[in-house]
């Protein structure tokens, strides 16, 4: 999360200056394909520091508020809290209620938050007729955090039905404990678990490090600094991760749908495509599909989603993302798993903390200052 650590950043419409070393549109890409679709941001509601969201039952969109409440957004507006854990969480540093997710049948609801001691916690609730059953609450997974930043906290169910959990490297700066490359800790990793497979959770047998005595079985991918929002392309199953850089480079990482896991995204030997503080590029480093530098106002990437809605045909198949400090909504075009170009969509979401994909594929933008927008055709 990036709430206090970049508080001096100026939010405006100035454009983020991106490094296009990997992403300049190919010469044979048709001009029509390079033209950014015209979009608008429609403010649909105001929430109290919205931090994350998920498609909910009955066509609703559930919005997490950082202090610990969850509300349901429908055509009638934003509901009263459907869940309130404000007495159990802390918002100092980059902490709070950081992620929410439903399983595919809306039978269980999961929350990812930092408790009063700062411990990253994932809890589960049963859901009946679209409503949370508080008496069924149980803790699935916990991870102590050495510092109040780089907690990650995003959670999503993958196409395989397993729960993926993003955890940052533990914080401070420069990964002082070497967590990113250390397979004996959950920090700096993307985890993959089966929350209903055992108590408190099961480990999928095909996780890449199962049986390795020097690695945690929960790990799906590693070498992450602060994975700030990841998603699965609902059209292809590909995984995309926005990973916040240290001081120079922001990156978007990718894994194809047929990945067997085990990707090493390089941190803290690498920051993007660049050795970090004299680091050596790991032999198995999976380089980002896109990176940008901080010569503009951008300083903290916010990962988003591949757009699969129907309202904006020209945006379909493009990966929509932003930057907390810049706020410009951008899109990446892909071909065969590689970025062929980047577009500025011409709208600014403020302090963009997260995106939400609704049940029909339309995208919402969360501004930590309170605004909840829907991306609509202009």
Image (cartoon, grey):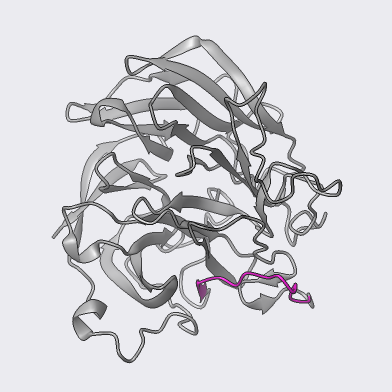
- In which quadrant is the C terminus drawn? bottom left
Q: Residue at x 45, y 25 (%)?
A: 69
- Is 156 a magenta residue? no
The residue furthest right is 213
Q: Dividing the picture into quarters, in which one does residue 82 lie?
A: top left
In the image, residue 232 sits, relative to residue 84, either above or below, namely: below
Question: Is 61 left, or right, of 110 in this rendering?
Answer: left
Q: Is residue 349 left or right of residue 304?
A: left
Overall secondary structure of the magenta section: loop
285 falls in the magenta region: yes
Along the line of sight, the residue nearer the viewer: 298 or 345: 345
**Is residue 119 shown to the viewer in this render?**
no
Q: Residue 249, how many percent across, how many down?
A: 58, 72
* Image: magenta residue range: 280-292
* Above or below: residue 48 compared with residue 29: above
On screen, residue 327 above or below 67: below
Percent x, y of residue 211: 80, 44
Residue 74's spot in the image, x, y percent?
22, 29
Q: Position of residue 21 (x, y in %)?
A: 49, 85
Which residue reaches farthest bottom?
Answer: 27
- Please identify the residue farthest to the left as the structure is shown: 378
């Amino acid at each position: 999360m990036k709430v206090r650590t970049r508080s001096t950043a100026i939010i405006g419409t100035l454009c983020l200056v991106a490094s296009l070393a990997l992403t300049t549109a190919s010469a044979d890409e048709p001009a029509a394909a390079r033209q950014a679709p015209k979009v608008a941001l429609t403010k649909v509601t105001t929430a109290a520091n919205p931090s994350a969201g998920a498609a909910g039952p009955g066509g609703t969109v559930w919005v997490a508020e950082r202090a610990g409440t969850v509300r349901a957004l429908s055509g009638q507006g934003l509901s009263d809290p459907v869940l309130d854990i404000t007495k159990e969480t802390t918002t100092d540093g980059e902490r709070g209620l950081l992620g929410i997710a439903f399983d595919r049948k809306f039978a269980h609801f999961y929350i990812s938050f930092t408790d009063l001691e700062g411990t990253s916690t994932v809890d589960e609730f049963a859901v009946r007729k679209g409503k949370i059953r508080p008496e069924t609450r149980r803790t699935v997974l916990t991870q102590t955090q050495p510092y109040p930043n780089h907690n990650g906290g995003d959670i999503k169910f993958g196409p395989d039905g397993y729960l993926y959990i993003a955890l940052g490297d533990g914080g401070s700066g420069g990964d002082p404990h070497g967590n990113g490359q250390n397979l004996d800790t959950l920090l700096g990793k993307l985890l993959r678990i089966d929350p209903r497979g055992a108590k408190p959770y099961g480990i999928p047998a095909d996780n890449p490090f199962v049986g390795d005595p020097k690695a945690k079985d929960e790990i799906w991918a590693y070498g992450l600094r602060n994975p700030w929002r990841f998603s699965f392309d609902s059209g292809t199953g590909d995984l995309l991760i926005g990973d916040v850089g240290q001081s120079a480079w922001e990156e978007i990482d990718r894994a194809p749908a047929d990945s067997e896991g085990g990707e090493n995204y390089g941190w803290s030997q690498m920051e993007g495509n660049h050795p970090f503080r004299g680091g050596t590029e790991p032999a198995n480093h999976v380089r980002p599909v896109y990176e940008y530098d901080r010569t503009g106002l951008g300083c903290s990437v916010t990962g988003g989603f591949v757009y699969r809605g129907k309202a904006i045909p020209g945006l379909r198949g493009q990966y929509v993302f932003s930057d907390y400090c810049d706020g410009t909504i951008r899109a990446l075009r892909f071909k065969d798993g590689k970025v062929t170009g980047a577009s500025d969509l011409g709208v600014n979401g403020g302090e963009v903390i997260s995106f939400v994909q609704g049940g029909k594929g339309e995208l919402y933008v969360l501004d930590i200052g309170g605004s909840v927008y829907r991306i609509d055709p202009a």
